[in-house]
Amino acid sequence: MNQYSNHTDSLEQFLKETTDSFCMTPNKRVWNSIYNNIHPCRMWPSFTTNTIIVICFLFLQMPKTVHVRFNHSLSKLVNKTTLYQESKVAKSKIKSNSNFLIKKNKKENNLADLPSIEIEINKSNYHNSRISESQFEQNNLSIKNDTSDLPLIDKTNNQNTFLNYTQSYQKIKKRNIQFSIEENSSYVKRKQSYLIQLYATPSFGFLQDNEIEENIGNVSSSVGGTASGIVTENKSVIKPTLNLEAGGAVMMNISRIIRLKAGMQLNYTKLDEIKPSDNSALVSNNPTLINYNPSNPLFQRGNTPSLNTDLFQISVPIGTEIEIMGNDKFRWFAGATIQPSYLINAESTDEIHLNNRDASFGLRKWNLNTSFETYISCKMKNGVILNLGPQFRYQWLSTHNKPLMSGMDKLYNVGLKLGVSRVF
Amino acid sequence: MTQELMIFGVIKKNKTAQEFLYQKFSAKMLGICYRYAKSRMDAEDMLQEGFIKVYQELHQFRGDGSLEGWIKRVVVNTCINILKKMKKFSDTIDISNAESLHTSYHIVPSFVQAKQVIECIRLLPIGYRTVLNLYAIEGFSHREIGLMLEIEESTSRSQYYRAKNMLESILIQMEILPNKNRTQQLG
């Protein structure tokens, strides 16, 4: 370089001088990542927004198609070649009609060398083609059309199944070849059904940990000096009592045994008042949260600070349910949901004024809960389905912004869920 | 915003103060991370981790040195920890491959000398490069480097010696440094 002469001694100096002035502008995403990491609360609005978007997506109408494949029965096969040719004719006839789209022509594995036709039926053209939608519900395909050019495919359980074709298909009719419409689970989709469920869940709520030990050494006092050697016995607890959950949900089948669930519910939790024991006083495990003052009556024996004890929470449960086993009448389900929740009456918080300084034990407005449930459903004759089973619900974050007792302020509920649902 | 106010704001988790601190020091710290990282993306990841640590530990800054120096130390330690996690240090690999490595100097840009020098440093093997950065630029001793990288002090010395020679030859090839032999002949 310019002033460089002594390689051995000056190289390090040269490197230091050169690299000291070197700067690079970072990408904006770096700051965004840092910011989200140090301020995680920002995740909640985006999480809620994404949840709402997912719920809306679940309710979007999807175009419904039913894939039907029918194969020629081996026992009735007379002339393979003729049949193949005729099926090709059938294929072309079907293709000419806008209601039927040939998906592909595949061979069935267990009926080798036999032709098969897979038809995709556009259900949005039901009314135009007068296809009865209700006939699909029994998973047997029955397409009727007043145009004689279209094939009529009848239910396949009959031995003497007949098909009305045009003159081109008279040979098939005469041979009385049985067409079987196979309901292949990989090709035929069950018609999507929705269930509306209304439920109520009386439950008992508990603290995560009822026993907390605290031993505070020196606690600074706002009036000067320190209070030392304060020992609290862990008898001060907040015991919830009977809780109630009520709400409604919409469930959508996405497969034979799995269904998605989303809804809205109201949770009511009643907390017992704080009851300090005879030998303890209400203090926080973190002296910086509260300025302890022995002269404050709140910290005297026998005083009971009052807190908001009735909590009303709106939750949006989103989750899945899996059918474990069952028959037409009784079915056993297990499910889990994530429930972002919002406390409606969080404004009416009580504040404990300690030495002219507010130590607000404000209630946390936003929270997240998880619930696990299992229940037996019983289908009644009128189509109504009754559900009954236990449920366990757990709150992830503490109820109060500044936990009263060592952060052990997370509620969990165990209850019995009663529900009524109906298919639509 | 004064430095004291900024530090106080960051400790109190004031968003404005945090952003101000980031805007003030991020460019230089990224330059430091770039010397240790394999790529720019890796350097930005190191920068991100480093600043998160700065925000978490700024309350430990006692003010007995410059804030920039303190942040630089935190960032360098973060870079080293990330490299250690990625298991980029292996004495045997570095030493065995050192002599056979050829510098592909044609990829070094020809503009801005500082950038040139940085890119020449980045051409070195990761172990050599790290020791060179820590000793020649950051100012750590070989003993400290040995503790940080979990290598022997003698290994640090030998790696630095080889790194310096290799870097010198690269810089001469790039004509950033004059050829020592030619200078002596002319002189």
Image (tube, coloured by chain):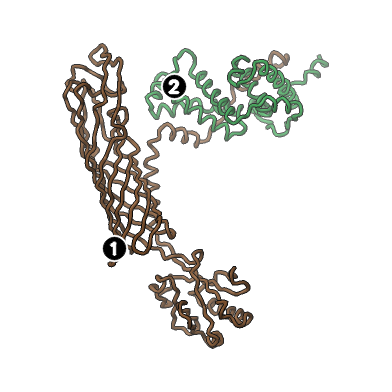
Chain colours: A brown, B green
CA distance separating discs 2 and 1 = 62 Å
Residue type at numbered disc 2: Leu
Report the residue marked by disc 2: B58
Camera sees residue A409:
yes
From the image, tell me which residue sits under label 1.
A384
Quadrant in the picture for the C terminus of chain A:
bottom left
What is the number of callouts on the image? 2
Q: x%, y% of residue A226?
A: 27, 13
Residue A410: image tag: none
Q: Mark 2 lies on which chain?
A: B
Question: Could you say which quadrant of the image residue A423 lies in?
Answer: bottom left
Left or right of A370, for residue B25 = right
Residue at (36, 61) in percent of width and height: A194
Q: Which of B5 and A240 is in front in this view?
A: A240
Residue A122 rendering spot, x and y as whole percentages: 46, 70
Chain name for mark 1:
A
**Mark 2 vs 1: CB contact within 8 A:** no
Circle 1: element type:
strand
Image point (44%, 81%), residue name: A145
Relative vertical location of residue A125 with respect to residue A216 in this rendering, above or below: below
